[in-house]
Image (tube, coloured by chain):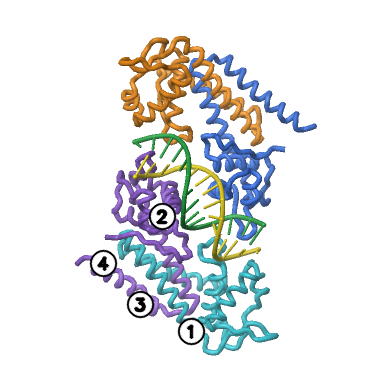
Chain colours: A blue, B orange, C cyan, D purple, E yellow, F green
DNA sequence: GTGGTCTAGACCACT
DNA sequence: GTGGTCTAGACCACT
């Protein structure tokens, strides 16, 4: 089961990590249209983070049209948000790959070496999944 | 010739962008052992950045053993720094690719789509080079 | 017949929207002295709102002297409440207009432009009425 | 000289009052393209408000494309932001007027009475200006 | 000094 | 309990 984790030492702000992580979970269909996502406080406990930080992440997702807040109820996934979430995640992945390739090229790394990193990354991902299944 | 650029809007601190950019240039052989790198002030003017920021980047490279300061001369590339720089750049690229693949997997993106992004990234890099040659 | 509606996304608290809406209906003579207003539960269903929220609005109207609760009957419009309701609504309208004009003036909008907005607002109101008559 | 004030008792969040107030000042040409606006901390002292609240207002203006943050320097008015600010302020004024007229109509207030409020609002604004000139 | 992020903790409206 | 707003105060990167 995909889960949300946060790296407090990363240069990427924690609230953005949470927003992007939730977006991935929506893209993956873990949270579906009309369903509630974990409440601000609950999520804060899970991620060991201040509620305000989660709040900020959820606000960003609301502005992006993926979530909608219902007074006294909680945050709910909006209709049609899955394709939008997928597009957003795809954009991030595309940018990361472009950055990686640009840096590799600038440092004169061989295509062969970088290809091997790319393949290994996929292999490790599958391995993670495999470990979780049994 | 690959050049150093900085994105002030990025989440990655500018001093780190400079340090990693310089490291790539060393890895690529643009700056060779015994050669001087641009002075802090010169570099600051070129990158439209505060000298303190460049200073900090150079300190990081000194700690990493890639540069050393020679009195009255300036910062000089240390002997044997090229393979170290290459290893460092390779590590960053490896991490970026791993992040990209992990996020792609979390969002349920198809391997096929992500492969296409990866190939396009390489194609764009070559196109850039081609443009720069004439 | 003018009806009561509530905008849950507004910055104005829902309970206040309800209180002011009811006051307008009293001012307009839709609810007359001695008559019952919709029960808390009924109103809550109509407005798709929690009964507590309606309750709070009715309490506010009670404190304002427009409604009184009669045991076994429900909330009833008090004698002489119509002029008071009209004065209250007039005060709100006066404040809104003052705010609008103050903000227009602060932003340097021309009197001509703001006059046109004001006239259009009246025209739209009449159009709404016309639509409702047939 | 137009100044920025905040009403902490209003239902409108303070950070939005600040954002809209600053937008009016940009629309009025008090802050011009390329100029710095008061720093977050300075503004917070002036308005007797927490810096985070000002920060949030400035973020909203940044998202709206009116301000731009320059690292270590401060928030600067973006090129071409004046017409955008004017349009934004006009929209708010239009909405306030529409609300006022709708509520007046719902309460059965006479057009004559509401017109007199509207005219008085303009008269008061001019009076304020007159008071400030000598 | 300037903006950006985060924590800790409080109060409010609404369910 | 749920989200929304706000204060007080801290640390970071950058000028």
Q: Secondary structure at mark 3?
A: helix
Q: Is residue B31 left or right of residue A26?
A: left
Q: CA distance from mark 3 to mark 1?
A: 20 Å
Q: Which residue is mark 1?
A: C84
Q: Residue at x 28, y 69 (%)?
A: D128
Q: Is residue A61 visible?
A: no
Badge 2: chain ID: D
Q: Do the dots labelled 3 and 1 sit on one chain? A: no
Nearest to viewer (mark 2 / mark 1): 2
Circle 1 packing at 10 Å, graded few (<14), some (14-19), many (20+), is some
Question: Which tag, 4 or 2, sits closer to the chain's start?
Answer: 2
Whole-angstrom CA distance, mark 2 to mark 1, is 36 Å
Which residue is under mark 4? D129
Marks 4 and 3 share the same chain:
yes
Which quarter of the figure has residue D95? bottom left
Residue under numbered circle 2: D19
Please state the chain letter of the residue tagged with numbered disc 3 in the rendered image. Answer: D
Q: Nearer the viewer, residue A83 or D53?
A: D53
Asked whether residue D96 is in view, the answer is yes
User: The disc numbered 4 marks a residue on which chain?
Assistant: D
Farthest residue to the left: give it: D134
**Which residue is at a point 58% across and 50% down the rendered structure image?**
A51
Mark 1 and mark 3 in contact (Cβ < 8 Å)? Answer: no
N-terminal-most mark, 3 or 2: 2
């Amino acid at each position: 089961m995909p889960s949300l984790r946060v790296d407090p030492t990363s240069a990427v702000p924690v609230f953005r990590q949470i927003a992007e992580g939730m977006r991935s979970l929506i893209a993956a269909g873990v949270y579906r249209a009309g369903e509630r996502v974990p409440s601000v406080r609950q999520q804060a406990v899970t991620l060991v983070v201040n509620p305000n930080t989660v709040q900020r992440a959820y606000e960003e997702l609301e502005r992006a049209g993926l979530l909608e807040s219902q007074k006294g109820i909680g945050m709910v996934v909006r209709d049609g948000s899955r394709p939008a979430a997928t597009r957003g995640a795809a954009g991030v992945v595309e940018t990361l790959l472009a950055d990686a390739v640009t840096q590799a090229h600038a440092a004169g790394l061989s295509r062969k070496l970088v290809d091997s990193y790319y393949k290994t990354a996929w292999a490790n991902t599958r391995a993670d999944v495999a470990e979780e299944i049994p």
